[in-house]
Structures are given as structure tokens and as C-alpha cells.
Image (cartoon, helix red, strand yellow):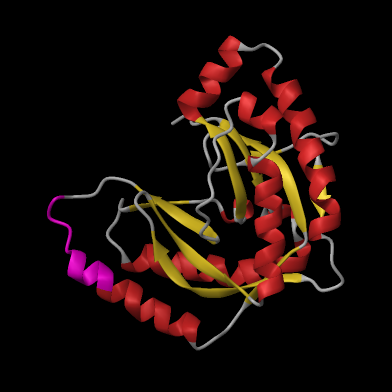
Amino acid sequence: MPFPGYTVITPPWEEDAENSAFYQNLQACQEQVLQQLDENLLVPVPPDSFHVTLADLIWDSAYRHAVDENPQFETQLYSAMAQSFEKCKSLVTGSNPIRWQLLGLHIMPRALGVCLLPADEDAYDRILQLRRCIYQNHDLIALGIEQQYHFTAHVTLGYFGDVSPELDRERVSATISQLNDQWLENSQELWVHWAELRKFDDMTRYYRQPDWPILEF
């Protein structure tokens, strides 16, 4: 189903060799989940597109409306995002890498993923500064980019599909709990080294052009 928009994310796995081991483990987790949950309950995200969303921007009807109303919307979006990245560059660049630790499986209203926690206060503060530079940019606000300060770092594994009224929710809960035990015993970290403006058409593939703004931490 078409669901277009723009977002700021870490590079997808297919372009992020530094985190390959982390994402390989997530792929194994995804396969376990799919094997143990009811068929058709979860529509898996292609592993190549695994990523962390750093700042949601605009999507679906809001995006369609913005493009229809303003033929220059996308050009103005690229320019405003470049300004935000440049403004926060000195605030987020540091000598230490930004690392987030895998906490466990995370159930969201429409999706299942794994939740991440910052490895230290510096990792959290630098991402917070990035988000402030984006959501407090008046040019972005004028384009319809809503200020969203709630942030739960995660990697989506799949979206819920057809949920049967007869779904055994207790069994699903027990299955997820058992899988979580595996992850809690095996601490893993993801390195956040880039923030990139990306476009998506259906939330299964995130792409960019070479001249779109990026930020190196």
C-alpha cells in the first residue's frame, strides 16, 4: 500500500557495513519471530532496509497535500534540512562514537521492533540536539513538518497485518517474552554514525539522491 513521505534515518543495512553484525542478528531475530507467531500476523520489513529513525518528518496525506499545494515543496525541504544539519553540526560532532544498546523486542500500535537505549548520556544528548535543530527550524515548520519531541529509538522488524479476533494474545505475549530473554543475555550495540534525509514510498525501502543533505556525527 502506498505510504509516501520523508524521514531522517541512519543508513539502511544495505548501505551500513559498520553495523552489519548487529543487523545480521536482527535478521535472525526476525526469522524466529515469523516462525513462532501466527501466519499473516506480521508483514516483515525487508532486512536490507533495517534502520533507526532519528526524526520523522512528513508522510501520507500530509505529504500528498504539501506536494499538491506547493510545487517547490521538495526543493525547499532539501534546503531547509541542509540548514538544520549545518546548524547542529558543531553540537553533535564528538570524539566518541554514538552507540545505542539493544534492549529487547518492542510492541508498537502498528508494528513490532526492537527497542534501543543510549549507551551513555552523550549519545542521547547528541541525538536530542539533532532533533531540536530539525523541529525548531522555522522553514521546516512552514512546510508542514510537525514538531515531534517524543522519541523511542527502535528498529522495526515488521508491521501487523490481519489480526484475527481469535488471536491467542497470551501465547503471543509469552513468545515475545521468551525471545526477549535471548537478547537480554547477549548485549549488542548499534553505531549511529550518519543521519540522512531519505524518501520512502511504502515504508519498505528508503532511498536518497547523492546531493541530498547528510550529517556525519
Q: Is residue 117 visible?
A: yes
* Quadrant including the N terminus: top left
Residue 183 image position (x, y, % from top left): 49, 80
**Relative to 120, residue 42 above or below:** above
As drawn, is 206 to the left or to the right of 15?
A: left
Residue 82 image position (x, y, % from top left): 81, 37
Which residue is at the front of the view, 212 or 84? 84
Residue 37 is one of the magenta-drawn residues? no
Which residue is the extreme one toward the bottom? 185
Residue 160 image position (x, y, % from top left): 35, 50
The stretch in magenta equals 165-173
As drawn, is 192 to the left or to the right of 202?
A: right
**Relative to 100, residue 63 above or below:** above
As drawn, is 14 to the left or to the right of 28?
A: right
Q: Image quarter for residue 81?
A: top right
Residue 167 is one of the magenta-drawn residues? yes
Which residue is the extreme one toward the left? 166
The residue drawn where x is 87% and y is 71% is: 95
The residue drawn where x is 50% and y is 25% is: 62
As drawn, is 127 to the left or to the right of 86?
A: left
The residue drawn where x is 55% and y is 25% is: 63
